[in-house]
Image: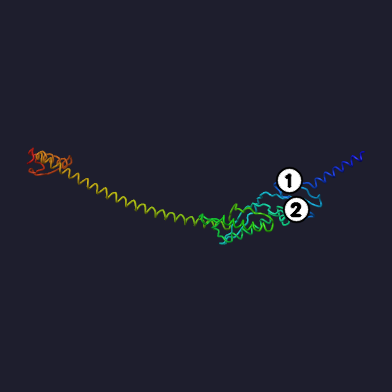
Amino acid sequence: MKRKIILGFLIAGLLIIFIGSIFFQVDETEFAIITQFGKPVRVIETAGLHIKWPDPVQSLRRFDRRLLLFDPEPSEYLTEDKKNILVDVYMGWRISEPRKFLEAVKERPVAEIFLADITSAAMGAALGNYPLSALISTDPEQIKVDEIMENVTGKCRQRAEAEYGIHVLEVRLKRLNLPDQNKESVFQRMRTERERMAKKYRSEGEEEAMKIRAEADKESRAILSEAYEEAQKIIGQGEAEATRIYAAAHNRNPRFYKLMRTLESYRKVLNEKTTVVLSTDSELLELLTEGKVKE
């Protein structure tokens, strides 16, 4: 009886092991590849429960189907104008052809080694066609970073798809730096460029200031001319009115008019600091000596 129970347990255990070796679950975030004696025979891309022959006849390999990020080590490149520059990039990639990926690469770390080589070659070829000012410049119109990275992405994508079954989504620039031996010369060139731009702006400002001053002087002369003309007109009208008033006063009472004009002359000529020596028959002192003015 005990032997039968033990035999039953053994059979049940072997059956569980057998079932566990032929059934397997595939997640939505992965590919599954069934290999037979080391060669891929079936690629499973749909999530759910699947079946295969038990080991060692058939084995199961799993690969991540999500977007993966790869951050290679910064590398030094030579630009078209023979300037060394240190470039740090990152890449987004995913497995597009699982069978080809397994045959050519087998593991993610190996894939990233190949991707680093592809990126380095594409980056070196692209930067060799552009001067340093396409990456670093005070003039926004000279910057060609987006154009360069689109070129690099296209070359990496084409080669990775053809050779490794990898789709490169995008290669983007993370950081630019300069080797220590090149920093001083680049900074000096940047300072020179900024000084040139500053001189240009100052020259344009001085030219604009001269135009503004010339226009202001022109307007000032026009305003002063108009004001002088108006003032002379008002003065002329005032003098004419004064002459008319004097004439009317004189005609109305000539003696009183002459008296007022004489007193007015005294007020203008004489004060506490004035010393005047005149003859007794001077008309200026006629009022003081005779108490009257001549007709």
Q: Quadrant of the C terminus?
A: top left
Q: Which mark is residue 102?
A: none
Disc 2 marks a residue whose amino acid type is: Arg
Give the camera-side residue of 190 and 269: 190
- Looking at the rendered image, the quarter that the N terminus falls into is top right
Q: Residue at x 91, y 40 (%)?
A: 4
Residue placed most toward the observer, 17 or 45: 45
Residue 41: percent from left, percent from top: 76, 54
- The 10 Å Cα crowd at callout 2, few under 14, some 14 to 19, many 20 or more, is some
Q: Nearer the viewer, residue 201 or 93?
A: 93
**Residue 150 left/right relative to 95:** left
Any part of residue 215 in sight? yes
Q: Residue at x 79, y 54 (%)?
A: 36
Measuring 75% from the left and 53% from the top, which residue is drawn there? 42
Left or right side of 249 for 43 = right
Point out residue 167 in the picture as x, y percentages from the top left corner. Answer: 66, 54
The answer to which image quadrant residue 12 occupies is: top right
Q: Quadrant of residue 180?
A: bottom right
Q: Pointer 1: what residue?
A: 48
Q: Answer above or below: position of 97 versus 280.
A: below
Q: Residue at left 73%, top 45%?
A: 48
The amino acid sitting under disc 1 is Gly
Reading the image, the residue beneath label 2 is 42
Residue 183: horizontal and vertical position, in percent?
Answer: 56, 56
